[in-house]
Structure formats: C-alpha cells, structure tokens
Image: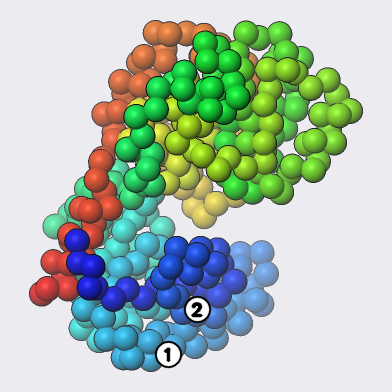
Amino acid sequence: MRPEAEILFVGAKGRMEMQRVPEAGYKIVGLPIEGFSRKNPLINIRVLWKICKSQWMARKIIRQFRPNAVVGVGGYASGPTLKTAAQMGIPTLIQEQNSYAGVTNKLLAKSARRICVAYEGMERFFPADKIMLTGNPVRQSLAETDMSKEDARLQMGLDPHRATILIIGGSLGARTINESVLNTLGLISRTEVQIVWQTGKYYSDYIHHELKRLQHPQNLIVTDFISNMDAAYAAADLVVSRAGASSISELCLLGKPCILVPSPNVAEDHQTKNALALSNKGAALLVRDKDAEMNLIPLAVSTVADASKLADLTANIKKMALPDSANKIALEVLKLADE
C-alpha cells in the first residue's frame, strides 16, 4: 500500500510484543510500563512512577521518529504513547479489538481522531462520529487457503471421513479446557469423532504424564502446538476455543462453528462479553469457565453430530465476519497521516 512508509512499534518491556515484533522484521522500542495492581496497592506507587517515566520516554521517541500518525491497540504502551502524540498535535487512531472497550482506550478516545472497532454498538463507549466498523486483522493465509476438509485431514494424519473437533487454548494453553478433556477421556473413547487437542506448551509435560497414567483414546490426537493452523481449521467441523478478539475474528472470517470458553482471568472480563456478542446472535455456543469441566466435551460431541446445528452456527457466524480489516484500518491510518 505504501512500501516506503517507515513504521516504529512501541511496546511494554517484558511483554510478548518485544519478542514478536522483531521476529516479524520490524523495529520496536520498549517503555517501562505495567498495569495497576488491585491486590497490592503499594505496588501502584511504582506503577505511577513508571507511567511518568514512560510518558517522558514517549515524548522523546516521538520527537526523534517524527510520525505523521500514531496507532494504539489498547496495550500498556498505548496509553503514554497516544496521550503524548495527541498533546503534540499528531493525529491518533485507536483500534479496539473487543466488544467491551478497555479503560485505556476509553480514556484515549477523547483525543483520538478515528476509532476502528470490530463489533456493533460501540458508541456506548466512544463518540459515534469517530467510530468505523472495520473488524480485527487476522492472518491473511487463513482466508486465502482453498484446502478441502479431506485434504486438510490427510495432511494432519487424520481420518479424512471422520467428524473432527479442534480444541485450542492458545500457545501456552488453557487449564480449564485441558482439564475438561482429561476428565472425559472415557466419553471421548466411546465416540465416533476424532479430536485434535492443542494443549499448549505450558501444560504439555503434565498432560503427557496423565495420558500415560490414564487410558489414552486412539481418537484423541494430542499436540502442544499447531504450526499449520490453516490445515487445522480446514480439517475441523467444530472448534473449541477461548474468546480472545483475534481468535473470534478468525472463526468469523472462516465461518467455523465454535464453542467459546471465555477466560475469566482477563481485564474487565472482556472475553465473556466477546463470547456473548456471538452467542446472543446464535453465532457460537458459550460455556462458562466454571461449567466447562462438566459440560464442555459432552456438548462438543453432541454438537458435532448435529448437522442442522452446525449449519445454523456456520450461517450465523459468517454474518459477523468483517473481511479485509487490515487494509481498511491501514487506509484510515494513511488518511490521518496525509492530513
């Protein structure tokens, strides 16, 4: 779109972006910022000092880099960076990924020129005249694959004609989802479906130990990490997932029937609100984290065998897809930069 454009990322030291951004080939600078603690108020004295230091550093970074526009996606570093940019007269854009706006983005919205959102009804958080419904950027390769379900299953070493459930809990894993599988191994072994279970690296050793101790069903394929998500999604009739913004956007774009298990350990319980935005429209099934160990796998097994239910979920989740989100947001950023 603008190959000559210079891009600088600003992140929070010690957070995932400090590793992921350089891996993608971009430069990033870190701010010594962290979130407030609700459990230990004394820590917040240090947090306040780090916020002041980060604002000073953000001003120095902006003066040196001289950006035409600044974009924030709601992380810790967005606060001081976008606040400072707005004070210096540089146009800012916020991308709110969730259906429930975070505190940082609600505060930054007052000075932002444009606010890109992924859900309808966000005017309850932001000024309506600044909002654009763009969706969330997703991995482009997912949308471009033309792999058939049978070919995808063969590529993953699965039976090409057997109903398939994909269970994913993120790269590190999800404890509740993993326990839900371990507690229902007997049920899984009696079903006609095949299940691909991504445990996450954090739980991998424990789960392999438990599977050796217990009976490992032959129709349960276990892996700590899936490198080819294109094939994994294509192979699945039903996906079980947490309700993070990126995961939901991928499922919508691909039109995948899904059961969402929101993590309760996130700010302002936004994953539950993300999941409700879909389940209230019949676009996903919702299982609360506290109910998952008893209900998740039985629901998944019964749902994947119900062709009518799968068809309804597919039709409804496709209606919520917002394709080409990355380009839409990039165009808005370029408009602001040109101003």
Q: Identify the residue at image location x=72%, y=32%.
A: 179
In this rendering, position of residue 283 left or right of residue 45: left
Q: Identify the residue at image location x=20%, y=53%.
A: 328
The residue identified by callout 2 is 30
Disc 1 on helix, strand or loop?
helix
Q: Picture quarter containing residue 252?
A: top left
Q: Identify the residue at image location x=68%, y=22%.
A: 220
In the image, residue 115 sits, relative to residue 82, either above or below, namely above
The amino acid beneath tag 2 is Gly
In this rendering, position of residue 79 left or right of residue 167: left
Q: Identify the residue at image location x=45%, y=63%.
A: 24
Look at the image and tell me in which quarter the C terminus lies.
Answer: bottom left
Look at the image and tell me in which quarter the N terminus lies.
Answer: bottom left
In the image, residue 320 sits, relative to residue 68, either above or below, namely above
CA gap, disc 2 and disc 1: 13 Å
The residue identified by callout 1 is 56
Q: Position of residue 332 (x, y in %)?
A: 18, 61
Q: Position of residue 76 (x, y in %)?
A: 47, 69
Disc 2 on helix, strand or loop?
strand
Q: Please rate how many residues cluster around mark 1, counting C-alpha atoms within 10 Å: few if below 14, some from 14 to 19, many from 20.
A: some
Closer to the camera in the image, 134 or 119: 134
